Image (cartoon, rainbow, N blue to C red):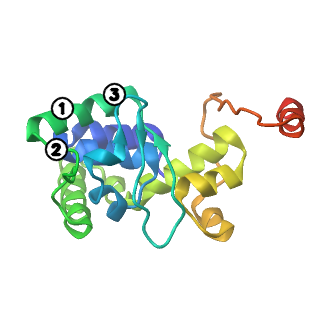
Amino acid sequence: IPLEKTLDMLIASASPSLALKLSISKETGLRPVELVNLKVKDVDLENKLVYPATAKHGSARAVKITFSTLEMLKKHIHKRNLGNNDKLFTQSSKLYSQSYRNYRMRLSKKLEDPSIRTIRLYDFRHFFATKLYHETKDILFVKAQMGHRKISTTLRYTQLVEMGDDSFTVKIASNLEEFTQLLES
């Protein structure tokens, strides 16, 4: 999987619309088809949560986005005067993938860096899964956040790599047994 700084560079160099899509992909791990099918009503702007309609018969989920992505999203909604039932993006997942590949090729030539051509759109999803596992060490949580039905699918997405930071995730126990387990970890 690419490094976070590489993904951030791809996002920063993209057009505003593509940058928003890539940023959401990186932060939520949504499949391209889930991303392009998002509607305004699927985003909780107050709590920075995205509730995607799942693809591939996966599990329903809510995923957080950062403040910067939320701000880009608000600008996007306002600029296009989108209503609650409107889709956030008009492109199909096929066109989204194609526009990303075209952008990636142009950027690779411009920067004279052929390694950029190897970064697939799904690598943003792989990055999300790997980073989330690194932060939580909870493969079942990662499975839920990815919208997978089978743990074996999640294991394909999650790679054991050093992410280079010491961030952590806070969890809340709902009973004494969970509290004890969290305290021990």
Could you tell me how far apart the alpha carbons at marks 1 and 2 are, in whole angstroms? Answer: 13 Å
- Return the x and y of residue 6 as percentages of the image width and height: 39, 42
Residue at (57, 64) in percent of width and height: 148
Which of the two labelled residues, at mark 3 and mark 2, occupies the earlier sequence position? Answer: 3
Camera-nearest residue between 138 and 54: 54
Secondary structure, mark 3, is helix
**What residue is shown with label 3?**
68
Left/right placement of residue 80 relative to residue 74 reads left
- Return the x and y of residue 30 as percentages of the image width and height: 42, 55
Secondary structure, mark 1, is helix
Left/right placement of residue 148 relative to residue 54 reads right
Q: Amino acid at mark 3?
A: Ser
Asked if the residues shown at circle 3 and circle 1 are in contact, with their CB atoms under 8 angstroms apart, the answer is no
Could you tell me how far apart the alpha carbons at marks 3 and 1 are, in whole angstroms? Answer: 11 Å
Camera-nearest residue between 86 and 108: 86
Structural crowding at the residue carrying mark 3, measured as other residues with C-alpha within 10 Å and reported as few (<14), some (14–19) or many (≥20): few
Structural crowding at the residue carrying mark 2, measured as other residues with C-alpha within 10 Å and reported as few (<14), some (14–19) or many (≥20): few
Which of the two labelled residues, at mark 1 and mark 2, occupies the earlier sequence position? Answer: 1
- Return the x and y of residue 56 as percentages of the image width and height: 46, 73
> In what quadrant of the picture does the C terminus appear?
top right
**What residue is shown with label 2?**
83
**What residue is shown with label 1?**
75
Residue 36 found in image quarter: bottom left
Which of the two labelled residues, at mark 3 and mark 1, occupies the earlier sequence position? Answer: 3
Could you tell me how far apart the alpha carbons at marks 3 and 2 are, in whole angstroms? Answer: 21 Å
Q: Depth-wise, is mark 1 or mark 2 nearer the camera? A: 2
Secondary structure, mark 2, is loop
Q: Amino acid at mark 1?
A: Lys
Q: Depth-wise, is mark 3 or mark 1 nearer the camera? A: 1
